[in-house]
Amino acid sequence: MPAWARRVPRVRATAKAAWHNDSVLRMRVELPVVEIRERKPPWLKVRAPGGPNYLRLKRLMRDANLHSVCEEAHCPNIGECWEDATATFMILGDVCTRNCGYCAIAHGRPTWEDREEPERVARAVRDLGLEYVVITSVNRDDLADGGAAHWAATVRAMRHHAPRCRVEVLIPDFQGDAAALATVIDARPDILNHNTETVPRLYRVARHGGRYARTLELFRRARTTAPALPTKSGIILGLGEERAELLATMRDLVDVGVSILTLGQYLRPSAQHLPVARYYRPEQFAELAEAGRALGFTHVESGPLVRSSYHAKKQADSAGTNVRGAQRVLTDVRGAEPRASKTGHPRPEPTTDLL
């Protein structure tokens, strides 16, 4: 056999290998980029929603052009709560003027304000026959009063259309505007809720536009304005807080009159949000609940999947807030300047385990 013939298979094999490598290269280029999701502990797994009440409530939300924080914030309890015909309504649109590092709600410049929304929310609550409802909103720093008048209109519409339904308001900080807070309190909600979210050291990273001292001042003003009005706050865990500063934050909330506390695990909405510093085990949440009750909270709802409005009716019942429209003593605090907060937070030392 001539030499050239013996070389043909080798040439063909080389050409075949080159074609194969080129195909693999093209395949690698054309494959979509898939984001690698972090593995969550087994106690954070929940059943996908889809029951009949869930579908009915979702259809009602769409028909009435209403928003819920359950959907916008990717709440893991949406299936359980909506199957129980309970929901947290989100007013003043679905675009927030702030960009908090943990929050899944869209941020930007809102252009939407629907003056008919309070009536639509109240009629939806009436049609569902709800006994307890939570109202929340995005931050609307673009509005002169932060949306306080819209808040008050929603609560009053609820009183008109669903008078037997208790109303919990989960409000923003209104940039420390005392008059805006008084406007909401004047509408006589049953519980005033404002989330602290994290310890003061992490505010600069996690709560863009928020101020820890402003949060404490909101509760001080609420206690001065309406001493009988129960107040509530929530903290998400796993952003990098240490045990000592977490307990100090809980103590601060007790000192300003907060009676109900929720503690839940932070879950990263996307790769663009703050990473999870750690996952707390269920027994660690139970220990923190005991610590909170020892500090003086009337009720502590603590668990990996707990959110501010999760089991809100049970929280209110446990805290003894069955009397609707608690009588209040109104003190004029409009125009008052926020006082400096003396928190006494310790400087945390690096640790490998919080509990």
Image (cartoon, helix red, strand yellow):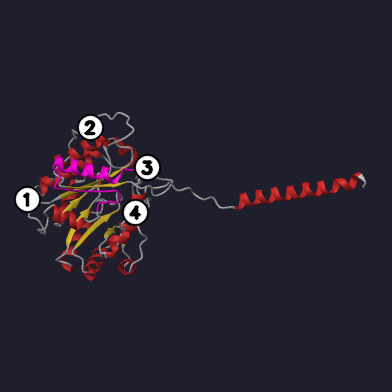
Mark 1 surroundings within 10 Å by alpha-carbon count, few (fewer than 14), some (14 through 19), many (20 or more):
few
Which amino acid type is marked by label 1?
Val
Residue lying at the far front of the rendered structure: 1
Q: CA distance from mark 4 to mark 1?
A: 35 Å
CA–CA distance in space, label 2 to label 1: 32 Å
Q: Which mark is residue 345?
A: 2
Image coordinates for residue 16, horizontal then vertical, percent: 75, 50
The C terminus: image quadrant: top left
Q: Nearer the viewer, mark 4 or mark 3?
A: 3
According to the image, label 3 marks what residue? 276
Structural crowding at the residue carrying mark 4, measured as other residues with C-alpha within 10 Å and reported as few (<14), some (14–19) or many (≥20): some
Q: Specify the amino acid type for callout 3.
A: Val
Disc 3 versus disc 2: distance between alpha carbons? 23 Å
Q: What residue range appears in magenta?
A: 279-308
Q: Reading the chain from its start, which is encountered first: label 2 or label 4?
A: 4
Residue 50 left/right relative to 212: right
